[in-house]
Image (cartoon, coloured by chain):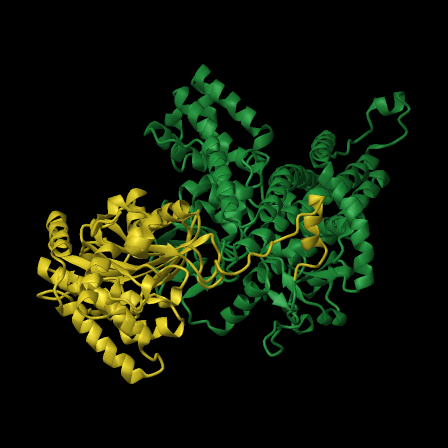
Chain colours: A yellow, B green
Amino acid sequence: MSAAVAWFSEVGIADRPTVGGKGGSLGELTGAGIAVPPGFVVTTHAFEQFLAALEARDAVRAKVEAVDGTDLGAVMKLSEELRRRVVEEPLPAEVEQAILAAHAELAAAAVAVRSSATTEDAEDASFAGLQDTFLWVLSAADTVARVRECWGSLYSVESMTYRLKHGLPEEGVAMAVVVQQMVDARTAGVMFTRSPTTGDKSVITIEGAWGLGSAVVSGEVTPDRWVMGKITGEISVRDISHKHAKQVQAPGGGIVEVELDAADADRPCLTDEELQALRDVGRRIERHYRRPQDIEWAIDKSGALMLLQARPETVWSAKEAAPIAETPANPLHHVMNIFGGGRR
Amino acid sequence: MADAAKGFPLPSSLKVVPGTEAAQAAYPYYTQFVPEDDQRFWFYNSMHFPEPMHHFDMITAEAAYVAMGAFNTRVHVLPTVKGIHHRIINGRVYIGSEPVTDPDDIAERVGEFQQRAFYYYEHWEDLYDQWKVKMKTLIADAQALPTPSLPAYEPLETVHSGKGVAANHNLLDIYQKQIEGYHRMWHHHFEFLLLGYGAYMTFFDFCKKAFPEISDQAISRMVAGMEAEIFRPDEEVKRLARRAVELGVDSHFTDGMDIDTVLAELDRVGNAGKEWLGELETSRNPWFNVSSGDGFYHYHRSWNDDLSLPFAALPGYIDKIKSGTNIERPTAQLIEEREALVADYRELLDTDEDRAAYDQLINLAHRVFPYVEGHKFYCEHWYTNLFFNKIREFGALLRDHGFWEKEEDVFHLTQYELESAIVDLMLSWAIGGEARGPSYWPAIVKQRAAAIEEWGKHGSSPALGAVPDLIDDPAIVMLWGITRESLDTWLNADSEPDSNELKGFAACHGVVEGPARVVKSVEEISRLQQGDILVCQVTNPTWAPIFQKIVAAVSDIGGSMSHMAIVAREYGLPAVVGTGTATRRIKDGQRIRVDGGRGTVTILDDEPALEDA
């Protein structure tokens, strides 16, 4: 695939090299029949075309490789220069046309523009979070501008320093960008399909707050928290917190934080039915990927549940799974765990 | 670690309630606390004995601990724990275990245990089939015992047949056979029980390691049997409701009906009524031999002795049948759900090795569970009911000879005193003179009745003595729901009396609010209204028919495998068990919230609401 733009329905996780982790995951979920807000990916081919145009005028990658990563002043100066160029210099016409055409076809009143790095969400989890997400982008022109900013984030001080420190070659550095219909979230949050505290795969942990999920992900609002049996649906923990504010659409685009009155702040942001719906979708995604997942979700004002992101859980999965019990030749020896006094 | 500063009262600090000293002293000497008992940890067995014990009923504890200890200590040879000590004060039964701590002793006992217990596990089905035969024989023997009586003269047959034994000897014979049979029943009871619980706990333990946050109820649901005898009495009530509708006699069954009148009417109204009465007889034998209590007290009468409970449930079931509501137990669906649960958890395991162990353990748990669920019907219900009714016959005989006023007064005597009263009667019949009993027992009966009443007014500490670090006895953890955590909760409950929240075991999930109906004994069951939340010390499967009326259940005592938990799950009724203090802290009529998934009960009212205002 070498197109500048790919629809979610056309891609899957195997396309990560060209659509990035986030784009590949949203494509995979769409293909698996999970409700995902519709959208497309501006692929790494688009980025490569743009980068070629930039390089034609002045070096980009060579400059990054040449800078002394320990010289913060030099890195900052280079970052400023490269980000300005990414935002200001002309886009190849075919790339711009492809984005505008796809935006028109999507026909969304507002979109989210989210960076989808080819390394992000993958083996190098610590690289995640260095890229940007823009919410409530209202026009086609703004969408193109935000795509450029996402690309520009590859040349942020943190991003470049990280690559220099780890000796990652610039040659492979590329970024895809996800453009998808904005969910007017009533409630949003995250879900882990195992326990973050014990690693237990038989429970699902859900955190949520009013408004956009950005408030939860960024930690600006203490979310409500539930723990439920993955298989039984029993809700074993209900921590309803004081959610002092929520993030919503700002007039003219972007997001703004609004204070909540006491009644809303202390009210659970999900019903039991919604929790069960989340559990169902969490199980489906886990079954699809055959491993525990870290999921971002939102429920819109009409009550529809949408998935915004799913990636493999990394912390517990990285641990060696020790056998729980030996399998003795005579299964009856198991009971000695209880009767033999060797239980504790 | 045990908190030295925070403990329960020492046994030696407990006082006999003033005025009841003589009644206390009448319990056997080996059940009285002595100073050395301060060294041991005790807890109040309010699961089995929530009310002060009549002196005769004490045999239920004695026979059970004689048998349980024998199997633990000498038959199966459990490696780490032997039998159970029991003490009685103010009518309350305290128990403490006898642990094995010497590593050499444990090692020796491990060897013994493996050749004994493993034999049982390997031959479980055959041995259990044999067990049922033994129990049915024992029951038949008890049913065959004649009603004790003393004729004015021996029938001529005694002479003609050269029998050589007079009627007064029969009294002793019947009594001793019945006592012997009761002890034998308790031995049978413990023949499988600890091994069954242990196999279940092994699976439980594995699940807790594999899934640290799994709920007890999820594990229990994976193991639960579907054809267990404990569900059968309620099934029979449903069947009778269905038959009443089919036969067109359902209009006779109304809330608050007089049962004798209804039975007489049905006998009069022709074939349909008579046919229903025939169905009733079919259900009664044997399925109405269930105690409306746990079977541990003489006044826990069976449905056969008092039809109130099944009849109280009939109108509700009839209404549901007529309105097309399905009241059938969806056995096929329950089995399907259980199998799906087992498969779904299995799928979450990481390795083939874990899956192999899981398969072995669930298989063993499923094999042993029919006994764990089924034994109670034969032992605590059917046999115990026969036993207490036989003692009632002696109560009536001795009453007729002036020993006391009422048949029930017999239960104020210990089993040993009763034997002496029987010998007194045998002597007087033989002498042809007056018995001493009529001038001896009435005052004692009166004194003991007063003591029972007095003791009932006094609460009792849930435990005594220093809290041990480990509570290893699988029976204690499983049956009584006593763990370090629950002891800590009980200790803290007393130090935080203002908290509106009680913690217990999550027995069946669901969140419900409603008025609390605090039911302290079986006789109060009729106070339950549609929509109430049952708050009780402990309940048992025979309360199942009234589960259709209530919206949730809360108990003081019970673990995840207690019968309330099993039945609540079966009926999908939110329940919290093992709260320790619910009947003391919740007032009748208060609104409460039961969260059966979290195991919490919240008191919503500060003051009790007016009843039926």
- Locate residue B253, reporting x and y percent: 40, 30
Indicate whether A98 appears above or below B322. Answer: below
Indicate whether B255 appears above or below A47. Answer: above
Along the line of sight, which residue is nearer the eye, B438 or A313? Answer: A313
The image quadrant that residue B210 belongs to is bottom right
Left or right placement of residue B367 versus residue B122 in this view: left
- Locate residue A273, reporting x and y percent: 31, 49
Which residue is at 59% across, 28% downward? B285
The residue sitting at the top extreme is B271
Left or right placement of residue B47 versus residue A187 in this view: right
Q: Quadrant of the C terminus of chain B?
A: bottom left
For the question of whether residue B244 can be seen, the reply is yes
Indicate whether B60 appears above or below B312. Answer: below
- Locate residue B282, reporting x and y percent: 56, 24
Indicate whether B505 appears above or below B16. Answer: above
- Locate residue B535, reporting x and y percent: 46, 54
For the question of whether residue B404 can be seen, the reply is no
Which residue is at 50% across, 62% downward? B581
Left or right placement of residue B101 versus residue B517 in this view: right
Along the line of sight, which residue is nearer the eye, A309 or B256? Answer: A309
Along the line of sight, which residue is nearer the eye, B131 or B299? Answer: B131
The image quadrant that residue B147 belongs to is top right
Q: Quadrant of the N terminus of chain B?
A: bottom right
